[in-house]
Amino acid sequence: MYDLNIVLRSDIPKCLYEQIYEYVRQEIREGKLLCEERLPSTRSLAEFLQVSRSTVELAYEQLASEGYIESRPYKGYYVCRLEELYQLSQPRETTVVSVPLEEKREYQVDFSPTAIDMSEFPFGVWKKINKSILSDSNSRLFSSGSAQGDYSLRETISRYLHSSRGVNCKPEQIIVGAGNDYLLMLLEKILGRHVSIAMENPTYKRAYQIFKSFAYPVETVDMDDNGMLVQQIGEEVKLVYVMPSRQYPTGTIMSAGRRSELLKWAGGGAGRFIIEDDYDSEFRYKGKPIPSLQAMDKHGKVIYLGTFSKAIAPAIRVSYMVLPEILLKKYEAECSFYSTTVSRIDQKILEEFIKGGYFERYLNKMRKHYREKHDLLLQELEPFREQFEISGENAGLHVLLKSKRKLTESALLAASEQEEIKVYGLSGALVDSKDSEERSTVILGYGGLSLDEIKLGIERLKKAWL
């Protein structure tokens, strides 16, 4: 982060705004403030320098009029391109006043689709389990343990997956890791390099970035209301990454027919596999839980990924991967020397949390808690239905709004920012985003918001969009 060091002197005849103007101009001329670099906001700079905001505004206006900086709506002030003016100057005496150049925008309400609510988490129970485990003086928990994770935890996870998601697996097939990122990197070691992969578009962008870092050729496949269009998968593709129970970010549920079609594709060629990312299966508000794709797999073609980040807490960083038998053999032969990335103490706490019934009780409480937020959000969004299509509302922790008036995503985001409300564009999840400016869909997450914040946020969005 660049610190803007400004000298303000009262013993010279120059006005304060002139001193600010001359300092910034000199920094630009010397190349210390680079082209496209963002300046502090007028409010932030005025607070740090203990001067009026109008003083800073005068300095910025003068700099803008001379072409040193430019104002960008809803973004701030940025340095213009002036290479021919860069020059060296003599050192001068300075008094340091540190001003962070990058100012994080604060919002009244942030509709983040990734935030969750930790207000109901049973911290007392977690602390009690932790204390009980450490007080047992169990020295084995301080050894390295199994590379796949402790067997007792994997056994507990396998029972949980079978009862809640219909997943059919043995504890031996499960690998526990610190987050899905690690498990995907481990999977790359198992599958090898340069494996061609197909992904839905839009998709979970982080997974796409990870696959690209493996030098995997990635192709995007369109979707309809039933999920990925299997017939569009290219001939060279050996791996398909999908979220069939609730696709992110669209909320689409892959139909039974489309699942069968995808499994048939996987069985139709040697070395073909499906990665099922079941990231958000615990929270569903309408109908019965959607069974996993792995539950339909009879030929060992589905690699199942799950995580406790949404259901418990992101900070515990515990995810799991269920390998088909054929890939398990390859893992054992070539990759089992990789050490586990999750502390055995954390594994034991999680195991006791699940086995003791605390996890199930917590999930039931959070389902009711999120259902209350979900219902309130949809109620508050009723006035929007004339101008927006609302989708993805039957599960998960976010909904999508698509403008019927074809207002662009950038226009919707800019209008909401004026009301100090943060929403998210669908283009952030697009792999091929060349037409993103023409899109008109935004994402509203509500998991991390209180009921009052939801009401306030929607009230502000009414002013912005209706």
Image: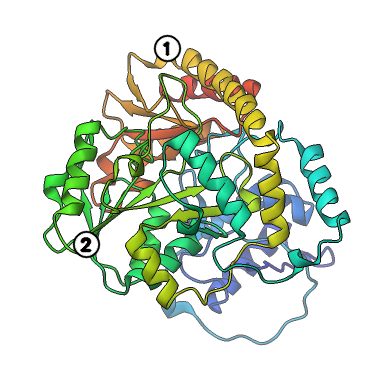
146 versus 436 height, above or below: below
**Which residue carries the number 2 mark?**
238
- Please tell me in which quadrant of the rendered image residue 142 appears: bottom right
Q: Are marks 1 and 2 in contact (CB under 8 Å)?
A: no
Residue type at numbered disc 1: Pro
Q: Position of residue 222 (x, y in %)?
A: 20, 44
Q: Position of residue 279 (x, y in %)?
A: 46, 44
Q: How would you rate the neighbour count of disc 2 (Cα within 10 Å): few for under 14, some for 14-19, many for 20 or more? A: many
In this view, the residue in front, 251 or 239, is 239
| Image quadrant in which the C terminus is located | top left
| Image quadrant in which the N terminus is located | bottom right
88 versus 431 height, above or below: below
- Give the mark nearer the N terminus: 1 vs 2: 2
Position of 137 with respect to 403 (left or right) is right
Position of 237 with respect to 116 (left or right) is left
**Which residue carries the number 1 mark?**
383
Residue type at numbered disc 2: Lys
Asked whether residue 450 is in view, the answer is: yes
In this view, the residue in front, 6 or 158, is 158
Camera-near label (1 vs 2) is: 2
Report helix, strand or loop for mark 1: helix
